[in-house]
C-alpha cells in the first residue's frame, strides 16, 4: 500500500474542498485530483494542480480574446495540425503538477528531463521510509542478448527465487545499517541513548537504489508530451514506462483532444530516415528488398521492419 492512513486522510480532506474560479477546469481531471494512482509496489502518481485545457491550446494558437465559438471538430482539426507540424508553443500554455513516489533508480532516469520544475523529498532533513521496489516475478528478465539496454526472457524457478531473495536481503540489510548509523527511530528519538548518530545526509549513502523517493514535478504540456514520447515508448525501461503510462491516462482526462493527437502523430507514429523512406517507396512499388540490398545496417533494417510490422 503506497499510502499511510494519515496520508490518505490528508488527501480525502483536500478532495472534500472546492473553490469557485473563473478559470477553465476539466471535470474528468477534477475527478481524480489529489488521488494517488498506484504504480509499481509502493509508488504512485498524483495530479496536484493544472492550468488550462484543450481550449487553452486552441486559444493561444488563435491568439483569441475569449473562448471562441468554434466547434469541437474545428478545435480537433487545429490541434491535430499543430501536433503534425510540430507547432509546439501553444501546448506550452498548459501546465500540470504531479506528486510522484518512485524508486531512486527510476528517479535518476527521470531527472534527465531538464525542462521541468522539481522539488524532491530531502533525505538530508528527513528519514527515508523503509520501502523498496522488488519486481514482480513477471518483470524478472534476463539480460537481452541482442540489446545491451534491454531485457530478454523471464527468469524462472530457482534463479528467480534467488534474485528476489538477494534484492530483499540487500535492501533490508542496508536499511538496517542506515537506521543503525542514524541511531534514530521513525519518531526521531535516539535508539541507543549513549551513542551519537551519523548525520542523515551521510547515513543515506549506503541505501540501495530501489529505495523509494518522492518529488513534486511540474511541467508544461509540450515538455510533458516529450517526456511521454520517450518514456511511454515500448523501448523505455518497464519501471519508468509504467509511470509514464499512468501519466498518459491523466493527460487523456485533462486534454482529450491533445491526447488523441499525441497518440496518433507521435506515440503511435514512426519517424523514417531518408533511406528508410526510400525503402518503403521501393516496397510499395513491388520491389523485393532485403537487408543486403537496402543499404541499411542490420540493426537499422531490423528496426525499420519492426516499425512496418514485417519482423
Ligand atoms: C531509451 C533511452 C535510453 C537512454 N540511455 C541513456 C544513456 O545510456 N546514458 C545517458 O546519459 N542518458 C541516456 N538517456 C537519457 C537521454 O539521453 C536524455 O537525457 C533524456 O531522455 C532527456 O531527454 P531530453 O534532453 O530531450 O529532455 P529534456 O531535458 O526535457 O529537454 C527537452 C528538450 O529541450 C532541449 N534542451 C534541454 N536542455 C538543453 C541543453 N542544456 N542544451 C540543449 N538543448 C537542451 C532539447 O531540445 C531537449 O530535447 C536515455 C534515454 C532514453 C529514452
Image (tube, rainbow, N blue to C red):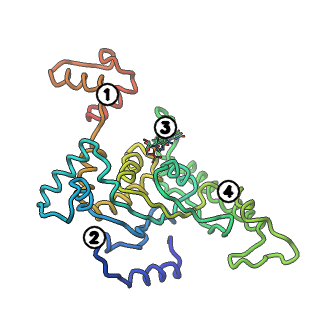
Q: Are marks 3 and 4 in contact (CB under 8 Å)?
A: no
Label 3 vs 2, first from the N-terminus? 2
Q: Position of residue 232 (x, y in %)?
A: 38, 50
Q: What residue is pinned by disc 4?
A: 170
Horizontal side of residue 4 vs 19, given as left or right: right
Q: Nearer the viewer, mark 4 or mark 2?
A: 2
CA distance for labels 3 and 4: 24 Å
Mark nearer the N terminus (4 vs 1): 4
The residue at 25%/41% (across/down) is 85
Which badge, 2 or 1, comes first in the chain's sequence?
2
Residue 156 numbered tag: none
Vertical placement of residue 34 versus 306, above or below: below
Q: CA distance from mark 3 to mark 2?
A: 47 Å
Determine crowd level at label 3: few under 14, some 14-19, many 20+ residues with C-alpha closer than 10 A: few
Residue 24's tag is 2
Which one is earlier in the sequence, the residue at label 1 or at label 3? 3
Identify which residue, 121 or 114, lies in the foreground. Answer: 114
Contact (Cβ within 8 Å) of mark 1 with mark 3: no
Amino acid at each position: 500500500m503506497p499510502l499511510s492512513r494519515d496520508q490518505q486522510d490528508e488527501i480525502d480532506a483536500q478532495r472534500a474542498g472546492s473553490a469557485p474560479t473563473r478559470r477553465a477546469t476539466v471535470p474528468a481531471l477534477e475527478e481524480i485530483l489529489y488521488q494517488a494512482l498506484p504504480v509499481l509496489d509502493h509508488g504512485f502518481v498524483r495530479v496536484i494542480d493544472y492550468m488550462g485545457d484543450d481550449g487553452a491550446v486552441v486559444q493561444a494558437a488563435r491568439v483569441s480574446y475569449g473562448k471562441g465559438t468554434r466547434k469541437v471538430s474545428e478545435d480537433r482539426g487545429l490541434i491535430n495540425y499543430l501536433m503534425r507540424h510540430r507547432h509546439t508553443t501553444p501546448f506550452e500554455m498548459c501546465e500540470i503538477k504531479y506528486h510522484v513516489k518512485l524508486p531512486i533508480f527510476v528517479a535518476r532516469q527521470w531527472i534527465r528531463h531538464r525542462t521541468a520544475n522539481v522539488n524532491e523529498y530531502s533525505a538530508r532533513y528527513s528519514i527515508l521510509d523503509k520501502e523498496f521496489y522488488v519486481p514482480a516475478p513477471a518483470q524478472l528478465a534476463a539480460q537481452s542478448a541482442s540489446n545491451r539496454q534491454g531485457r530478454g526472457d523471464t527468469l524462472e524457478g530457482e534463479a528467480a527465487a534467488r534474485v528476489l531473495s538477494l534484492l530483499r536481503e540487500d535492501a533490508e540489510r542496508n536499511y538496517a545499517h542506515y537506521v543503525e548509523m542514524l541511531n534514530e527511530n521513525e519518531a526521531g528519538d535516539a535508539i541507543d541513548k549513549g551513542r551519537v548518530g551519523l548525520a542523515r545526509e551521510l547515513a543515506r549513502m549506503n541505501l540501495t537504489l530501489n529505495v523509494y523517493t518522492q518529488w513534486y514535478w511540474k511541467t508544461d504540456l509540450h515538455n510533458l508530451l516529450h517526456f511521454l514520447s520517450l518514456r511511454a515508448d515500448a523501448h523505455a525501461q518497464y519501471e519508468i514506462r509504467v509511470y509514464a503510462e499512468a501519466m498518459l491516462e491523466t493527460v487523456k482526462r485533462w486534454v482529450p483532444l491533445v491526447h488523441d493527437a499525441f497518440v496518433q502523430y507521435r506515440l503511435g507514429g514512426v519517424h523514417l530516415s531518408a533511406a528508410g523512406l526510400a525503402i518503403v517507396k521501393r516496397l510499395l512499388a513491388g520491389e523485393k528488398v532485403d537487408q543486403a540490398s537496402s543499404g541499411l545496417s542490420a540493426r537499422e533494417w531490423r528496426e525499420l521492419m519492426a516499425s512496418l510490422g514485417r519482423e
